[in-house]
Amino acid sequence: MDLREKPGKVQKFLELMLRFRLIALVVMVIATVSFVATGWQEFLSFPLSSSEAFGMWFAEVESVQSLWSSAQYLFAASVACFVLLFVFGGVRAGIASMVTTLISFAALYVLDGGEGVVLPMFGILALLALALFLFVKNSVACALFPFVLCSLFLTGLLYVCPWSLSESSMELWWAAFAVFAFANSMAFAFVAGKHLGAGVPQAGALVKAARQMLVPVLVGALLLVVAVVQSRSAGSAETPWLYAVLRYVILAVWFFVFFFPITSFAPWERLRAGSRRVEMKSKKKKK
């Protein structure tokens, strides 16, 4: 009699993504090179326009009331995303998501639409991520460089996605997706590192971490998409929900079909504990 627990459909899907990780990497590289070759200026315009719009919006904020009225949907969605990460990912994942969100907004504020700053900033980030990837024994180091590479691919997916004039600005979409992807990617890194620290093998730790991130990513992305649409249209009849659903699918597919399997190329195994910790649950016998 086989007493082993049979894997569920989600686990089977995640394990399948790990098996086809090389295909995901090749597809991402080819698509990203194609995006960059055909629309390099658009790639630069996304962070530039987003940072400029963020700086202008921040300068116009005069009070807490005006801050809430101008971004109430996005604030509510952000709080809900943090709560989901704390509940399903743990304290480390929740704190990591909050810190990375603050870092993302600080980067947008520093960039402030400066054309001569965006390329050096991205280059420094890529070199730093590569150095951490190669030499630092840390879960964030294992996930940061894959995220930097996958972020270009996510930008390209947004660039080729159909567009409607009644939608929120593309700068807002890019900023929201970039911050969300960064926060959840780093949360994933901390969850995977926790499992590796408990002695779980690399593949098992990554699959477990991805399973814990399932609800925060799927539900959080849904809340984010709704918040972005509502921040512009306020539920009007012209709300382009079809395009919004498409962008939601893009974000979910990006995380679980591309980012998750591509991170498995990182040297996670060096984070694994020498002995595996197993939590034993004691059962009291009824007298």
Image: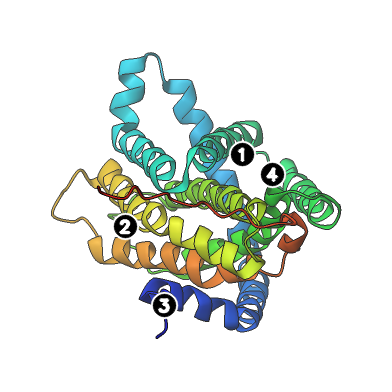
Residue 115: image tag: 4
Which amino acid does the dot numbered 3 rest on? Answer: Leu
| Nearer to the camera, 278 or 82 | 278
Q: Earlier in the sequence, mark 4 or mark 2?
A: 4
Q: Is residue 125 toward the left or the right of residue 43 in the image?
A: right
Q: Which residue is mark 2?
A: 165
- Label 2 or label 3, whichever comes before in sequence order: 3
Find residue 112 and report its horizontal and vertical position in percent: 61, 34
The residue under the point 31% across, 55% down is 222
On the rendered structure, is 263 left or right of 249?
right
Q: Are marks 1 and 4 in contact (CB under 8 Å)?
A: yes
Is residue 129 in sight in this rendering? yes
In whole angstroms, how far apart are the C-alphas of marks 1 and 4? 6 Å
Q: Amino acid at mark 1?
A: Gly
Q: In the rendering, at what x and y percent does residue 189 appear? A: 61, 52
Secondary structure of the residue carrying tag 1 is loop
Q: Nearer the viewer, mark 3 or mark 1?
A: 3
Tell me the residue that label 1 is attached to. Answer: 113
Q: Amino acid at mark 4?
A: Glu
Q: Secondary structure at mark 2?
A: loop
Look at the numbered disc 3 and give the secondary structure of its residue. loop
CA–CA distance in space, label 3 to label 4 = 61 Å
Please tell me the numbered disc located at residue 86: none
- Gap in Å between the C-alphas at discs 3 and 1? 59 Å
Q: CA gap, disc 4 to disc 2? A: 26 Å
Residue under label 3:
3
Label 1 or label 2, whichever comes before in sequence order: 1
Query: Is 54 placed above or below 195 here?
Result: above
Point out residue 243 in the picture as x, y percentages from the top left corner. 31, 65
